[in-house]
Image (cartoon, helix red, strand yellow):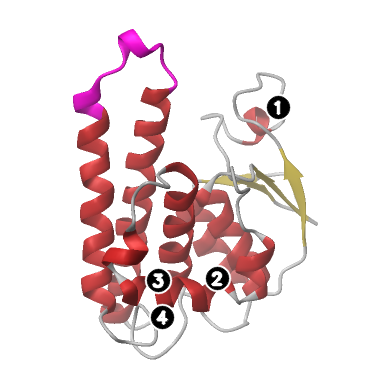
Amino acid sequence: MLKLYYSTTSPFARKVRIALEEKKIEYELCETSAWDDASPVHAANPLGKVPALTLDDGTSIYDSRVIVEYIDDVSPVSRLVPEPVRQRIAVRKWEALADGACDALVLATLERKRPEARQSPEWIARQRHKVEAAVAEMASELGERPWCNGESYTLADIACGCALGYIDLRAADFDWRGRFPNLARHADKLGKRPAFAESAPPKS
C-alpha cells in the first residue's frame, strides 16, 4: 500500500491527501515532522520535506506537484488535470499561483520564529505582499465561475482551497474573505467536500 508522509499543517501535503481521496486510492497516512532528524521522511525524501509518497516497491516520490501528477496518471477515476494542452496549462498555472502563496507564507512564518531582534520586518512584508497579490489574482481569475478552471472540479480548485486554508492558519489577520467574497464562497463550497473536511488543518 502507498504510504504518505505528511504533517497536518502542510498545505502541500494536504493537496496530496485530497488528490488521493478524490481519486479513491488507498494509502496509509504517516504523520511526521520534517524538523525531527529521526523522522522516516528523511529516508523517503533526501530534502527532508513533506509530503513524500512511498510506493509499493519501496521507491519514493516527493514534491507535491510530482506526487499529484503520479496519482492522476495511475488512477482512471476522473482526471484532476485535463489532458488538452490549453486546459492543462491553465490548471498548472493555478497550482503554481497557489503553491507560490504558500511558499511565501512559509518563509514569513519561519522568519517570525527567529529571535525578534534578528527578524527582518522588510522580508516578512515582502512575503506578505506576495501572498496578498496571489490571492487577488486568484479572485480575479475565478470571477463568478463555478470552478477555478472551466466547468469542472480540478487540481486548480484543490490547490486554491489548500492555499486559502493555509492563509487562515498562518495569516488570520488577512481578511481575504471580506475583500474577495467570490473566493470565500468558493472556499466554503470546497470545504463541504469530504476530502477537504477530513484534511482541514488544525485551528491553531
Kind of residue at disc 1 = Ser
Task: Bin the neighbour count of mark 4 within 10 Å (Cα to Cα): few under 14, some 14-19, many 20 and up.
Answer: some
Residue 15 in sight here: yes
CB atoms at circles 1 and 2 under 8 Å apart?
no
Which numbered dot is residue 26?
none
Task: Bin the neighbour count of mark 2 within 10 Å (Cα to Cα): few under 14, some 14-19, many 20 and up.
Answer: many
Q: Of callouts 1 and 2, which one flags the residue occurring earlier in the amino acid sequence?
A: 1
- Estimate the spatial distance between the alpha carbons at disc 3 and disc 1, rounded to whole Å: 36 Å
Question: In this figure, which residue is indicated by the disc labeled 2?
Answer: 72
In the image, residue 98 sits, relative to residue 48, either above or below, namely below
Q: Of callouts 3 and 2, which one flags the residue occurring earlier in the amino acid sequence?
A: 2
Q: Position of residue 136 (x, y in %)?
A: 22, 62
Nearer mark to the viewer, of 4 and 3: 3
Task: Bin the neighbour count of mark 1 within 10 Å (Cα to Cα): few under 14, some 14-19, many 20 and up.
Answer: some
The residue under the point 37% across, 62% down is: 95
- Estimate the spatial distance between the alpha carbons at disc 4 and disc 2, rounded to whole Å: 10 Å
- Estimate the spatial distance between the alpha carbons at disc 1 and disc 4, rounded to whole Å: 35 Å
Of residue 102 and residue 53, the one placed in the foreground of this image is 102
Nearer mark to the viewer, of 3 and 1: 3
Question: In this figure, which residue is indicated by the disc labeled 4?
Answer: 82
